[in-house]
Amino acid sequence: MNLNAAICRDREPDTSTVNDTPTLQKTAIAQVRRTSGDQTVLIVGFSAVLIFAVLAYCIFDRWTIDILELGSALLLLFCIWPQISSGRLQLGTNSLYVPVVLFGLIIVVQVIFGLSAYVHVTRVELWKYAAYGSLFLLANQLQPAGAHRLLTILAAFGFIVALFALVQDLTSNGRIYWFWPAVSGRIFGPYANHSHYAGLMEMLAPIALAMALADGARRHHQLLWVVAGILMGATIFVSGSRGGIIAFAVEMVFLAGLFIARRSPRTAWALGAICLVIGAFVFWIDDGRVLKQLDSLRDPLTDADVASRLTIARDSLRMARDRPIAGWGLGLFPIIYPQYRSFSTDLLVNQAHNDYLQALVETGILGFACVLWFIGNLYRRGMRNLKDHSRITTSPALGPLVGCTGILVHSFSDFNLHIPPNAALFFVLCGIASNSKTLVARRKRPELVPATNHHA
């Protein structure tokens, strides 16, 4: 009798599990909704900050930087404060965090210990870098769907800016938005410097092209993204930026190489056809300016602008030799350079026109090593994300990684990463390109517990 009772008790259903199933479902659903809401806020915040920075920087530079810093701080607070309040800070790991944090610590040491030749300027640059770091961290927390939505918004915005830039160039009166005069340089689109506009499009055009070549996309969507990519790519040439032209060409070769390596020759041929259309469109609207810039690339050393930049590079190396370890202080190149300038000019040399050399001058070997470390890890993680995706054209990392490649190439001959809207966009794209959440989502997809009864 006792044995039978024991057997009956063993076969009784686990009522606690049955009763807890609806609770688990409700908790899981609430968590999904909360995560979706957080992602929406991040996407809206990213879009607002980046779009405003691009459109307003060359008119209200100081206000734009303040809003960029404040916006990134508020987004970071929104993301981590609920986690801190609950006592569970959950941030995904990323090998790029180490060089980012170490570079920031170098700047902090420059400020605290007076290693900067002008502490106030370095302190101002520190706040900018903190904003970029925050945007990078937050972009790295985006879920695959959120990353795709943000990239869609940025690509659409790039198309609108490129269309405006082309119209403004064809009807130009030498003023930004036909109203605000530019201090110097040749305006293009919302930028006072055509090379900085090219830097923006180098990052946005590959996103549209990646979406146009994506497997499984609807044909009318692909057509729209093809048109957007062609227009954005064409305006890089029309802007007349030689560094931008070279960078975009490297991007297309890199992108085609990725397709060929993943045995997608048809996609590579489609990309080649798009590039031919870009070339035809450029020469159709060209007034001779693009041909002149392309012709100068045959013998660049005879160009006065190239020669002056090479001279600045040699002077920069002499600056780096005098403070090799921790540099002169972030943001101090234009202040220190006149002491080392080896040629006469009435113009202010505000940047080294080489972001890598300027990093070496301002942050020394320590900061320069962090830069190389960051770039190396970016490609290691980005390429791994592409490799682990079943189809390379569906990876959210494809467009951002190619866009980062363009701006990194352009940085050898210009200072796009010292332009706040371009630098902010670069760090956001780095965060998406190095984000491994897409792989986690594919390998370990959470499932809700089904509400089923357990019978003996």
Image (cartoon, grey):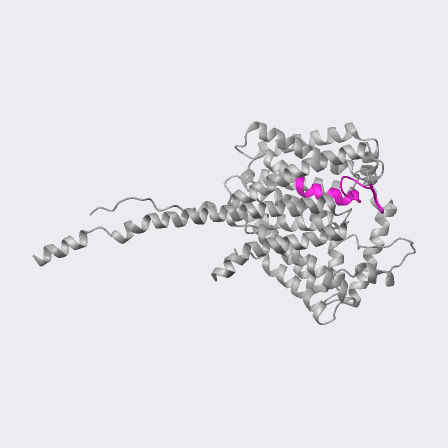
Which residues lie in the magenta part? 180-205
- Coordinates of residue 385 in the picture (x, y in percent): 54, 47
Q: Residue furthest bottom?
A: 113
Q: Is 194 part of what is drawn in magenta?
A: yes
Image position of 422 with respect to 364: above or below: above
- Which quadrant of the structure image shows residue 245? top right
Q: Residue at x 77, y 47 (%)?
A: 58
Q: Residue furthest left?
A: 1
What residue is shown at x 42% (from left), y 46% (from top)?
29
Q: Is residue 126 left or right of residue 308?
A: left
Give the side of residue 444 with respect to residue 429, left or right.
left
Q: Using the image as rendered, state which of residue 402 and residue 219 is in the foreground.
A: 219
Q: What count of labels does the image hold?
A: 0
Residue 281 picture quarter: top right
Res. 13 in view: yes
Residue at (69, 59) in percent of width and height: 127
Residue 170 x/y as whole percent: 80, 32
Q: Is residue 198 magenta?
A: yes
Residue 359's place in the image compared with 172, above or below, is below
Would residue 242 be found to the left or right of residue 27 on screen? right
Against 224, residue 19 (above or below) is below
Residue 402, image x and y in percent? 64, 43
* Residue 426, percent from left and from top: 66, 49
Front one among 428 and 300: 428
Residue 444 shows in the view = no
- At 14% from the left edge and 53% from the top edge, which residue is drawn? 8
Q: Quadrant of the N terminus?
A: bottom left
